[in-house]
Image: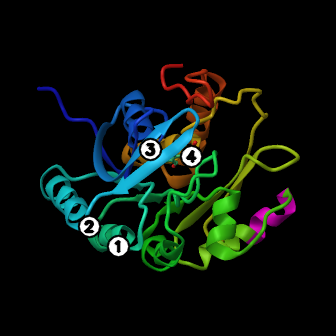
Amino acid sequence: MVTAPPRVLTVAGSDSGGGAGIQADLKTMLALGVHGMSVICAVTAQNSLGVQGYWELPPEAVAAQLDSVLSDIGAQAVKTGMLASTALVETVADHLCGYDAPLVVDPVGVSKHGDTLLAADAVDAVRTTLLPLATVVTPNLWEVELLTGVKVESEDDLMRAAEAVKEHGPEWVLIKGGHLPTRPVDLLYNGSETHLFSDERYDNRHTHGTGCTLASAIASHLALGLSVPDAVAAAKTYISGAIRAGFPLGSGIGPVDHAW
Ligand code: PLP
C-alpha cells in the first residue's frame, strides 16, 4: 500500500502572481516531498510590480478552514504567513494554541515592494498571541524592528535582536540578516544555543517569495523529523538554490524557482 507523506499546513495569503504566499508554500512543500495544505487568510491582487490590493477573509471562513483540515487530516507541522489583521491573528492563534505540531511563524509585515501586508494595529496581536506559540519565528530585519524596536545595522546587532524577539516566548528565533550591508548572515537562537548561517550574496534580483519559501521549507523539514537547527540548515540549502535559480517574470521582480 502507498503510505501518505507527512502533512504540512500553511496559513497565509494568496499571491495571484504565483511567486509568494500560499503558492510559494505549496510549491516548496511539493518539492520537499510533503503533502501541502492551505488555509487562506487573505487574497492579494499582485504581480511582479507589487501588491495592487488585498482582501481579508472573514474570521469565520479562516476558522472553518482550520477546523476542516485539523479535525480530519491533521498536520505534522504548521506555517503561518500573511495574516493581515488582528481578528485573523487572534483566530489563528486560538486554533493553533494546544495543537500538537511544530509551528513556524513568518511574521509577514511588508513586501519587498513596500506594500503593507499586516495592519499596524495587528503587530501587538502577533507579539502577544502568536509568538508564544511558535517553535521557530523567522523575522527579517524590518520585522525585527516592527516587533521589538531593535534596529539591526550590522552583524554585531543580531544577538541583541534575537534576545529581544525571544522575550516574546518563541522556542527558537531565526533572524534573517540577508540585507546586512557586509554579508548575508542568519542567526538562530533558543536562549542557550546559537547557530550562525552565512552565505554568499547571489547576484540575482528575482527573489520574490524568499521569506515564504524559507519558512515553508523549515516547516517541511520539521514534519520530516529534523531538529530545528537541522531543519533550518536544510531549508537554507533549499532557499539558496531557489534564489540562484530565480527568474524574470513580468516587468518587475521575478520569483524564486522551486524546480532548480
Ligand atoms: N504576498 C504574500 C501573500 C506574502 O505572504 C508575501 C510575503 O510573505 C509577499 C507577497 C511578499 O513577498 P516578497 O517580500 O518576497 O516579495
Q: Position of residue 119 (x, y in %)?
A: 49, 67
Check disc 2 and report its element: helix, strand or loop: helix
Which amino acid is tagged 1? Answer: Ala
Label 1 vs label 4, nearer the camera? 1
Asked whether residue 99 appears in the rendered view, the answer is yes
**Foreground residue, 254 or 210?**
254
Residue where numbered disc 1 is placed: 87
Real-space Cα separation, disc 3 to disc 1, in angstroms: 19 Å
Residue where numbered disc 3 is placed: 21
Residue 130: within the magenta?
A: no
Label 4 vs label 3, nearer the camera? 3
Residue where numbered disc 4 is placed: 211
The answer to the question of whether label 2 and label 1 lie on touching residues, with beta carbons closer than 8 A, is yes
Q: Position of residue 64 (x, y in %)?
A: 17, 61
Q: Is residue 179 above or below residue 86?
A: above
Residue at disc 3, CB closer than 8 Å to ligand 1: yes
Asked whether residue 191 appears in the rendered view, the answer is no
Q: Which numbered disc flags the more N-terminal residue, 2 or 3?
A: 3
The numbered mark at residue 59 is: 2
Real-space Cα separation, disc 2 to disc 4, in angstroms: 24 Å
At 49% across and 26% down in the image, what residue appears? 258
Q: Which numbered disc flags the more N-terminal residue, 1 or 4?
A: 1
Check disc 3 and report its element: helix, strand or loop: helix
Residue at disc 4, CB closer than 8 Å to ligand 1: yes
**Foreground residue, 257 or 251?**
251
How many numbered callouts?
A: 4
The answer to the question of whether label 1 and label 4 lie on touching residues, with beta carbons closer than 8 A, is no
Q: Which residues are magenta?
A: 155-160
